[in-house]
Amino acid sequence: MHSRDQNETANVQTEEKTAMKRRTVLAGILPLLQSGQWLDRLLLVNQGEVIEKRLLGITDEGTTEIAVLDSDGPTVSNEHEELLGQAPGEITTETANSLRETYDDLRFHTTVSHHGTSLNIFGRTGTIEYQTSRALYSGMAVGDHMSFQTSLLERDTIISLSCITSERESLQRRCPVGVEDPTAER
């Protein structure tokens, strides 16, 4: 009986040591996981309102402003009014291909007024013009509020949208954005 009690006591002590090791490991890892979420919130989210969109055509002779959209509405160069029609802010693949017959390169720019409501170590502040893809350019409108990511190598290039909404109060870190391929045609 005495050896049975000793075995049971030894088993209980082993289980307690194992549980203690688990708690120690969790106590060490949990703060790291929580700080990772905290850092994610602080470092990786840019938020702002789209205040202007510009479509530029580039040739050897220079740069042409094909379309500008801002709070006053769209302005389209006379030469491209018929092609761009009533939707100069949504450039289809066909429209882009047609414009590429005239221009060597197309550049899609959007100007964002950053929201300054949260601490953002690597996030941007103020009003900044970004280059983006045709798909992202077409997926956002002047007045939209968005959460987005920029390229690590080219900070003035938006590479993806996390959330887009018409009201600032509805803006979240992540939500459906409706842009299937954000890198489609620069």
Image (tube, rainbow, N blue to C red):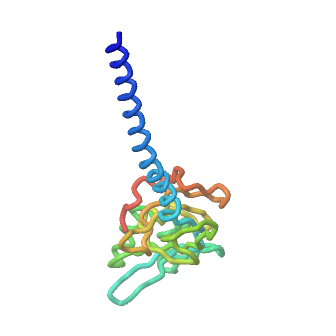
Q: Residue extending furthest front?
A: 2
Q: Residue extending furthest bottom?
A: 61
- Residue 129 in view in this figure: yes
Say which quarter of the image contains residue 152. Answer: bottom left
- Give whichever of 174, 137 is nearer the camera: 174
Q: Residue extending furthest top?
A: 1
Q: Is 63 above or below relative to 27?
A: below
Q: Position of residue 33 (x, y in %)?
A: 45, 51
Q: Position of residue 161 (x, y in %)?
A: 48, 59
Name the residue at 41% across, 33% down. 19
Q: Is 79 above or below relative to 184?
A: below
Quarter occupied by the N terminus: top left
Q: Position of residue 137 (x, y in %)?
A: 48, 66
Q: Is 176 above or below relative to 90?
A: above
Name the residue at 39% across, 44% down. 25
- Give whichever of 71, 182 is nearer the camera: 182
Q: Is 141 above or below relative to 67?
A: above
- Give whichever of 115, 76 is nearer the camera: 115
Q: Position of residue 18 (x, y in %)?
A: 37, 33
- Residue 69 in view in this figure: no
- Give whichever of 31, 53 is nearer the camera: 31
